[in-house]
Image: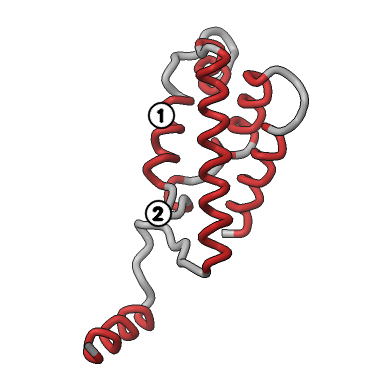
Amino acid sequence: MCQFSDKFYTAVSTLSGAGPIKERLVAAYGDNLDLIAEEDVPDIIQPRFDLLHTKMHATKPSGNENPVLAAVRKMSAPEAAACASHIVAMFSELVRVKTTGERLRPLRQKPAQSEIDAGRDRASLN
């Protein structure tokens, strides 16, 4: 999970840098978030991450460009800024969850037997 957090942190750092928003978005998403495997995305941000991934792969690339560059090229500056805001919001949610101690376990990962047993123990107390 640390590698996941590092990629998000680097993406947000890239977005906060200098230069046109479209260039920063291509670098932030393409160099960091596009490399994240779907099964590594925590369930707390999974739906928003999936929507962003879909938007960032919505345009068929031409020539030697990649899908992210093609998608961002077709966006207006306000659309690119909205995508950047979504990345920052997801990172903020990850930080909030980490601070509160909530679980970041990916949705598709099966719970460990100890988690199942602990759930049964809590249920039997009620």
Q: Quadrant of the C terminus?
A: bottom left
Q: Nearer the viewer, residue 26 or 76?
A: 76
Q: Amino acid at mark 1?
A: Thr
Using the rendered view, name the quadrant where residue 60 is placed: top left
Q: Residue at x 40, y 38 (%)?
A: 50
Instruction: Identify residue for label 1.
Output: 54
Q: Residue at x 71, y 33 (%)?
A: 16
Q: Nearer the viewer, residue 31 or 18?
A: 18
Which comes before the other along the chain, label 1 or label 2? 2
Side of 91 where 106 appears, left or right: left
SS at mark 1? helix
The picture places residue 114, in percent across and down from the top left corner, at 38, 83
The picture places residue 1, in percent across and down from the top left corner, at 56, 59
In the rendered structure, find residue 65 and report the number of the disc placed on it: none
Q: Nearer the viewer, residue 25 or 65?
A: 25
Q: Is residue 13 above or below residue 119?
A: above
**How many C-alpha atoms fall within 10 Å of the one at disc 1: few (<14), some, or many (≥20)?**
few
SS at mark 2? loop
Contact check, label 1 and label 2, Cβ < 8 Å: no
Instruction: Identify residue for label 2.
Output: 43
The picture places residue 89, in percent across and down from the top left corner, at 53, 42
Q: Is residue 39 above or below residue 56?
A: below
Q: Residue at x 42, y 53 (%)?
A: 44
Q: Residue at x 70, y 17 (%)?
A: 20
Q: How is the image coloured?
A: secondary structure
Residue at the far right: name it: 18
The picture places residue 106, in percent across and down from the top left corner, at 42, 58
